[in-house]
Image (cartoon, helix red, strand yellow):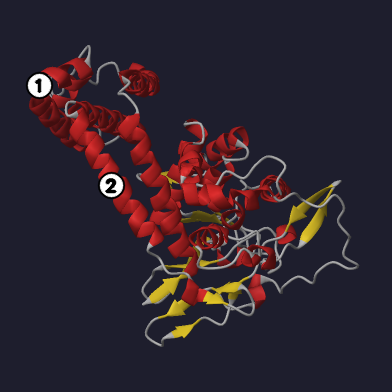
C-alpha cells in the first residue's frame, strides 16, 4: 500500500470541483435547449455515414429492429416524456442491436452508440427534473459529502518542515516516507501544494520554496519541469485557472510550443507525457515511465526515446485547441483510436521496433489518462467549467493570489548546455 502525495491532492481537488458542480446544478433551472443541441450535434455527426448506407435501415433484416425504430422517431425526447419506461427499454435493445447489425461498420457503430448514450443521458435529465426539489436536496447533500472528504485529507505528515517540501509519498508497509521530494513549481504536485496551504496543513512559505528554474524562450521566460512532460505543466490546470500573464500560464504556453516544435522536428505527431510504452514485463503488461521534451526537462529523456501519448494532446487543448484538434486528426490516421477512444501511446523508439515498423501502438487504456482527457475537453467545450468549479471553493479563492505570480522580465543564459543521457539503445530495454 502506498500513499501518493500528488494523487491525494488530485483526488481532493477534483472532489471540490465536483462539489461546486453539484451546488451549481442544484440552483440552475433546467434548460432543455442544451439537450436538444447535443442531440442535433449527434445527428449531424451521423448524417454523412448514414447517407453512405441508405440500405441499412431499409433491409428486411433491420427495418423492424429496435435500432431502426429508435432512429425513426421524429422527436425522441417527446417519446421519452410520454413513456419513460418503454423508451429506456428501447435504448437498451437498440444498444444490443449495434453488435449484431453493424459488425463491419465500426465508425458508424461507435457514433450510433454515442447517440444512444446521449439519448439515455437526456432521459435521465428529464426524470431528475420531475422531482426538482428532491434532486436539489440530493445534489446539496452530495456536495457536502464531497467537501468533507476533500478536506479530511491530512497532508501534514507528508511535509518536511525543514525543507518546506512534500515527500513524494509514504510506503505504508514499511511505515516510511519516500526519500524524494516534489521541489518544482512546474509540477503535477502544485495542486496538492495549493490545497494543503488552503487547508492550513502547511505554511505559505512552502509555495516560495518550490524551485523555479527559468530558461529563455526568445524574449520571454519558460519554466523547466523535472521530465518535460505535458502532465507536469497542465494537469493541475484542469481545475485551476491560472491567470493570463502569470508564470504558470506562460510556462504552460511555452511548454506546448516546445512540444509542438519537438514533434515537428521529428516528423511525428506531438504530445509527450508520462505513459506506458512498447515494453512488457514477464506478465506481458506494458511498462510505464516518465517521458518528456528535452528542452523542458531537468531529467533528460534518452535521445532515441520517442513515445507520443494522445492524452497529452487533450491536456494541450486547454492552451491550443485548434492545434490539438489537428494533432488528434493526425494521430487518428495512425490507427491510434479504438473502442474506448485514443489508445495509451504510439512508441517511435527505434530500440523497441521490429520488422521495419515505423511505430508500435501501445494498445491499452489507462483510466486516469482517459479521465484527464475528458475533463480537459470539457473545459474547452464548456467554457472552462471544471476550472470554474475548482476555483469557486472559498478556501481555494482565499489562496488564489499565489497563482498570480509573474514571470521575471529577464533570464540569464546557462554557460553551457546540460549534458544529455546515453541513448536508449545503450540501456536495458
Q: Is residue 78 left or right of residue 371?
A: left
Residue visible at 63% across and 67% down in the picture:
206
Q: Is residue 275 left or right of residue 106?
A: right
| Corner quadrant of residue 109 | top left
Secondary structure at numbered mark 2? helix
Residue 29 in the image: state x and y as whole percent.
32, 24
**Can you name the residue that lies furthest to the bottom here?**
174
Residue visible at 12% across and 25% down in the picture:
84
| Corner quadrant of residue 163 | bottom right
Crowd tier of the residue under label 1, counting other residues whose Cα lies within 10 Å: few below 14, some 14–19, many 20 or above: few
Q: Quick one: 23 or 262, which is closer to the camera? A: 23
Secondary structure at numbered mark 1? loop
Residue 194 image label: none
Residue 385 in the image: state x and y as whole percent.
47, 36
Residue visible at 13% across and 32% down in the picture:
93
Residue 83 image label: 1
Q: Is residue 46 visible?
A: yes
Which circle's residue, 1 or 2, is located before the other in the chain? 1
Image quadrant where one finds the N terminus = bottom left
Q: Is residue 10 above or below residue 324?
A: below
Q: Is residue 363 visible?
A: no
Image quadrant where one finds the C terminus = bottom right
Amino acid at each position: 500500500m502506498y500513499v501518493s502525495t500528488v494523487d491525494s491532492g488530485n483526488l481532493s481537488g477534483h472532489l471540490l470541483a465536483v462539489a461546486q458542480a453539484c451546488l451549481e446544478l442544484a440552483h440552475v433551472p433546467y434548460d432543455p435547449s442544451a439537450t436538444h443541441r447535443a442531440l442535433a450535434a449527434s445527428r449531424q455527426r451521423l448524417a454523412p455515414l448514414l447517407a453512405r448506407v441508405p440500405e441499412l435501415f431499409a433491409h428486411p433484416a433491420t427495418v423492424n429492429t429496435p435500432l431502426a425504430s429508435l432512429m425513426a422517431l421524429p422527436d425522441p425526447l417527446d417519446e421519452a416524456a410520454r413513456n419513460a419506461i418503454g423508451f429506456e427499454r428501447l435504448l437498451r435493445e437498440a444498444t444490443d442491436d449495434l453488435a449484431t447489425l453493424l459488425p463491419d461498420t465500426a465508425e458508424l457503430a461507435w457514433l450510433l452508440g454515442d447517440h444512444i448514450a446521449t439519448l439515455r443521458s437526456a432521459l435521465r435529465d428529464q426524470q431528475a427534473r420531475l422531482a426538482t426539489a428532491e434532486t436539489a436536496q440530493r445534489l446539496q447533500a452530495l456536495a457536502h459529502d464531497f467537501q468533507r472528504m476533500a478536506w479530511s485529507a491530512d497532508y501534514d505528515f507528508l511535509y518536511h518542515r525543514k525543507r518546506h517540501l512534500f515527500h513524494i509519498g509514504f510506503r505504508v508497509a514499511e511505515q516510511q516516507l519516500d526519500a524524494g521530494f516534489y521541489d518544482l513549481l512546474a509540477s503535477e504536485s502544485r495542486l496538492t501544494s495549493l490545497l494543503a496551504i488552503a487547508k492550513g496543513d502547511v505554511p505559505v512559505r512552502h509555495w516560495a520554496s518550490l524551485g523555479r528554474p527559468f530558461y529563455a524562450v526568445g524574449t520571454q521566460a519558460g519554466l523547466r519541469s523535472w521530465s518535460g512532460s505535458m502532465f507536469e505543466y497542465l494537469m493541475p490546470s484542469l481545475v485551476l485557472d491560472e491567470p493570463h500573464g502569470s508564470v504558470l500560464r506562460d510556462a504552460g504556453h511555452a511548454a506546448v510550443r516546445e512540444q509542438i516544435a519537438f514533434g515537428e522536428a521529428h516528423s511525428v505527431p506531438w504530445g509527450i507525457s508520462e505513459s506506458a510504452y512498447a515494453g512488457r514485463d514477464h506478465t506481458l503488461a506494458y511498462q510505464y515511465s516518465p517521458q518528456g521534451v528535452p528542452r523542458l526537462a531537468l531529467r533528460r529523456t534518452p535521445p532515441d526515446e520517442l513515445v507520443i501519448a494522445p492524452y497529452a494532446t487533450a491536456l494541450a487543448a486547454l492552451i491550443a485547441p485548434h492545434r490539438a484538434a489537428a494533432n488528434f486528426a493526425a494521430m487518428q490516421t495512425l490507427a491510434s483510436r479504438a473502442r474506448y477512444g485514443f489508445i495509451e501511446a504510439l512508441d517511435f523508439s527505434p530500440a523497441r521496433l521490429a520488422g521495419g515498423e515505423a511505430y508500435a501502438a501501445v494498445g491499452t487504456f489507462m483510466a486516469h489518462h482517459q479521465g484527464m482527457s475528458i475533463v480537459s475537453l470539457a473545459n474547452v467545450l464548456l467554457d472552462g467549467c471544471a476550472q470554474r468549479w475548482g476555483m469557486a471553493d472559498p478556501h481555494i479563492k482565499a489562496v488564489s493570489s499565489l497563482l498570480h505570480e509573474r514571470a521575471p522580465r529577464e533570464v540569464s543564459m546557462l554557460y553551457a548546455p546540460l549534458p544529455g543521457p546515453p541513448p536508449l539503445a545503450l540501456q536495458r530495454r
